[in-house]
Amino acid sequence: MGPRDRILDAAKLVFRRQGFRRSSIEQAAEAAGLTRQALYHHFESKEALFRAVIERLHENALSAEIAAADAAEKAGKNLAEILIAEVVARLKQLIAPLEGSPHIEELFSEHLLQARDLYQKYAAHYAEQLTATIERVCRKQHLVLKDINARDFARCIELAFNGTKSAYPAMQPVDAFLRDFSIMVRTLVAGAVGPSPKPRTAKTNPAKKSARQKSGDRK
């Protein structure tokens, strides 16, 4: 593990224990086994350090989401189950390192204050991932979206996610959050997705078929 990763691991623990406002560069340096000056060589401020921790959480969350979708597809899950699996994997990667912290609400609040651009950047990545999953699964499982395209449907899933968050500050308790989110996803999929219509086969006119048979008999 390089010094930057060691610093980020240590800073994550410090922020979890102390919250953002009560944490300091000195505490992060001590936890990483470095001097303050050595830490400043990698991060110019506590704010820059916090942003780097947040960015790594999002990167891990995106990787977990992709892997979860792939695993759920290989297991033969339906579209709703696949979408739930990947968003749950994302959520767990985002909150697991902070779960149990007495400062979790403050940390999520500071996340938006200190790293709103990162939040927006990864929100776009998550939406792209959901869109790709919807398109791929619909194609493989012979499904069609009713009066909505994959990108807009992915946006509906994200709105369901954000709407559920409004009912559970800092997404706590996790089990209740996931239960309600899962219900919303299953409801959305049930209303927006259906099987592909079977192609119509040309019907043979019985009279014409009989005439052809008689013509063949005369030959």
Image (cartoon, rainbow, N blue to C red):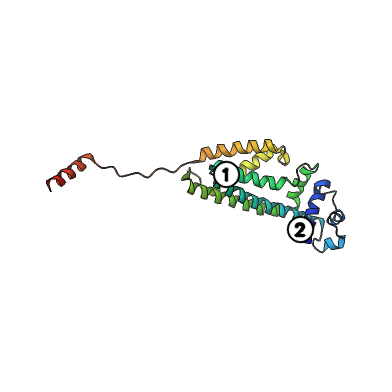
- Which amino acid type is shown beneath numbered disc 1? Ile
Give me the disc on residue 44.
none
Give me the disc on residue 5.
2
The secondary element bearing badge 1 is classed as helix
The secondary element bearing badge 2 is classed as helix
Looking at the rendered structure, the number of numbered marks drawn on it comes to: 2
Q: Decide which of tag 2 and tag 1 comes sooner along the chain.
A: 2
Q: Position of residue 129 (x, y in %)?
A: 59, 51
Q: Kindly identify the residue that appears in the image at 16 percent across and 47 percent down.
A: 216
Regarding residue 156, the answer to whether it shows in the image is: no
Is residue 47 shown left or right of residue 180? Answer: right
Q: Quadrant of residue 121?
A: bottom right
129 in relation to 182, above or below: below
Regarding residue 5, the answer to whether it shows in the image is: yes
Q: Position of residue 210 (x, y in %)?
A: 19, 41
The residue lying furthest to the front in this view is: 75
Q: Quadrant of the N terminus?
A: bottom right
The residue lying furthest to the left in this view is: 218
Q: Nearer the viewer, residue 175 or 44?
A: 175
Q: Position of residue 111 (x, y in %)?
A: 74, 49
Is residue 34 shown left or right of residue 63? Answer: right
Q: Kindly identify the residue that appears in the image at 64 percent across and 36 percent down.
A: 179
- Which amino acid type is shown beneath numbered disc 2? Asp
Q: Position of residue 25 (x, y in %)?
A: 85, 56
Instruction: Residue under label 1, please give it.
Output: 82
Is residue 169 shown left or right of residue 204? Answer: right
Instruction: Assess disc 2: are there few (<14), some (14-19) or many (≥20) residues with their C-alpha within 10 Å of its C-alpha.
Output: few
182 in relation to 114, above or below: above
Q: Kindly identify the residue that appears in the image at 80 percent across and 47 percent down.
A: 16
CA–CA distance between discs 2 and 1?
31 Å
Q: Kindly identify the residue that appears in the image at 12 percent across and 46 percent down.
A: 218
Q: Nearer the viewer, residue 73 or 146?
A: 73
